[in-house]
Amino acid sequence: MTRIGIARIVAGAAGIALVLVAATLPIWQMRFLAPQYPAGLDIKAYGNSVSGDLSEITVLSHYIGMPRFDATGMPEMTLWPFVILLAVLGVIIATAADRAWWRRLACTGLWLIPVGALADVQFHLWQMGHNLDGSAPMTIDSFTPLVVGPTVVMNFTMWGIPGSALALIAAAAALVTFAPAIPRRIPRRVSER
């Protein structure tokens, strides 16, 4: 077996392990900071649930007419196990396929998982910030919380952060995309005598 073949197998095994660990970790999280909450409040979105300081954030969001943060409004969360299965399949194809275009297609699909997940969360954040209840105790203009980075609403600064699940899937994509090229860059040892 060639060094490139060995590198592909090692990268594939590591990639599968990363994707399987990612299945149980948060996809996205948001931290709410305000003077009255010096320790901050947190939301974490997993493939099948939303957790964190949901009751406190729901009460605060009610004042400006925002819908509650939960998984019931996101039916695509039921697809997360299939996304993980597709990611594992993508790693296997990127590792085992003989044709370069199959490997490229599988690697592209792996890279698109974190991008697609963040785009989906961003869409839901837009919906939440643009479907404010006009009868809420406080009225504010529509806004869009950022999926990545800070958003300021009144005296709250909300920080959107990609979750560790997406980081691990991106790492798996990087492994199967770039690891096979590493042996080409390392010169072969010249046998002595």
Image (cartoon, rainbow, N blue to C red):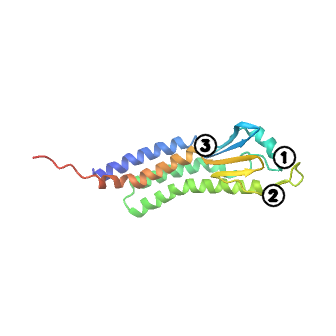
Q: Secondary structure at mark 2?
A: loop
Residue 175 placement, left or right of 189: right
Q: Residue at x 84, y 46 (%)?
A: 63
Give the mark toward the camera: 3 or 1: 1
- Quadrant housing residue 130: bottom right
Amino acid type at image mark 3: Pro
User: In the image shown, does 64 or 69 lie closer to the viewer?
Assistant: 64
Q: Residue at x 40, y 54 (%)?
A: 178
Residue 35 placement, left or right of 14: right
Q: State the mark number for residue 193.
A: none
For the residues bearing labels 2 and 1, Cβ distance under 8 angstroms: no
Amino acid type at image mark 1: Tyr
Q: Earlier in the sequence, mark 3 or mark 1?
A: 3
Distance from Cα at disc 3 to Cα at disc 1: 27 Å
Amino acid type at image mark 2: Asp
Q: State the mark number for residue 26.
A: 3
Q: Position of residue 67 (x, y in %)?
A: 79, 49
Q: State the mark number for residue 141.
A: 2
Give the mark toward the camera: 2 or 3: 2
User: In the image shown, does 102 or 177 lie closer to the viewer?
Assistant: 177
Disc 1 packing (10 Å; few <14; some 14–19; many ≥20): some
For the residues bearing labels 2 and 3, Cβ distance under 8 angstroms: no
Q: Residue at x 43, y 55 (%)?
A: 93
Residue carrying label 1 = 63
